[in-house]
Amino acid sequence: MEPPSIFPNMSDLSVTGNKSSPINHARYKEIISTLTQKSSWRQSQQLHKYQSFWCFPTFLEGIMAAQEQFIAHPTDIIACSHPKSGTTWLKALCFAILTRAQFNNSSTNSLLAESPHDIVPWIEFLAFTGKNRDPELPLLATHIPYNFLPKSIVEANCKIIYICRDPKDVFISLWQFAGKVRDTSAEAFPLEDALEKFCEGVNAYGPYWDHVLGYWKASLDFSERILFIKYEDLQNDTFSYVKRVAEFMGYPFSAEEEKRGLVQEIVEFCSFESLSSLEVNKSRKHSNAVPIKVEKNAYFRKGKVGDWRNYLTVEMAVRVDQITQQKFSGSGLSFSSA
């Protein structure tokens, strides 16, 4: 189940690795200019459709550059998600698991001084900027749909951890986040209009349902290298899932570590309440993680399951649920009506 190339002639291109050859932004822009466009929640940029997914031009350039440039290592662990599905939390947990030897030392615990997004880089934005990855950190992240992943990730049999979330909560989080990115209130783009676009799949890395299904089906075929997690399950039993994630990553907790409470320490430190209270994550400074202006505090809103109830009417919720049931029918995947 290899992801198809984003380029029609990708088989003629050599995948060489970060910064080993110039990133051809002009060629990427030319390709993108030929794609179908639709207006987005962000007034400054149109969404462009490649095959069945919508992306902003900047993101597409990153995907294209990653397809050509990114070289995965067999030891890599890739945290994957559709935007606003629990990505920040997953990054923090995975990084804390990997670096737990330094966890209790404030001088070496990077999560105390940096945003999870600035610590764990996005594959597509590394590629877009031409930056080299940290050779000491096997953990990376991406919003790239499964079918668009750089071929080297599949060929290297990297471990992939995918987190998804009830689409109603995803939508509300996207809507709120879009307002922060535009430096306006979310209400500047009417909720009804935003929901219409989301249901049509016209949002960054959307349609949401196709994004989730791509990784879900791959996880069924390759369960030994793809771990599929629901945000709701992770929140309901974080302790068990942290242990499960650590084992899947190849860094299981020892009996001694469990006995001295290290698992629970990581659970508590990486909780929404803990991370959101750190000065770095309350900052209005722009994150260096993405090539758009996003304040670090924009990544922390509520983190609550079922917050959609505070915004969506019954009719709106039913519409999203009906689409979810239709899209996921026969797949074995479903969400409870939290």
Image (cartoon, rainbow, N blue to C red):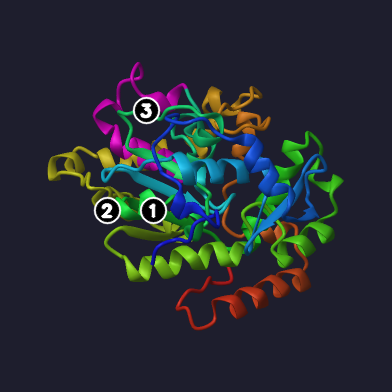
What type of secondary structure mainly makes up the magenta span?
A: helix
Residue 170 against residue 129 in the figure, above or below = below
Residue that carries the numbered disc 3 in the rendered image: 134
Q: Disc 1 to disc 3, how far (Cα)? A: 20 Å
State the quadrant of the C terminus: bottom right
* Amino acid, disc 3: Asp
Q: Is residue 337 left or right of residue 160?
A: right
Q: Can you name the residue that lies furthest to the front here?
A: 12
Task: Reply above or below: 242 against 270.
Answer: below
Query: For this rendering, which residue is in front, 153 or 247?
Result: 153
**Extent of the magenta region:** 90-113
Q: Which residue is mark 1?
A: 161
Asked if marks 1 and 3 touch (Cβ < 8 Å), the reply is no
Left or right: 84 as drawn, with respect to 268: right
Callout 1: 10 Å neighbours few (<14), some, many (20+)?
many
Q: Which residue is mark 2?
A: 248
- In the foreground, 146 or 267: 146
Percent of width and height locating residue 204 = 66, 51
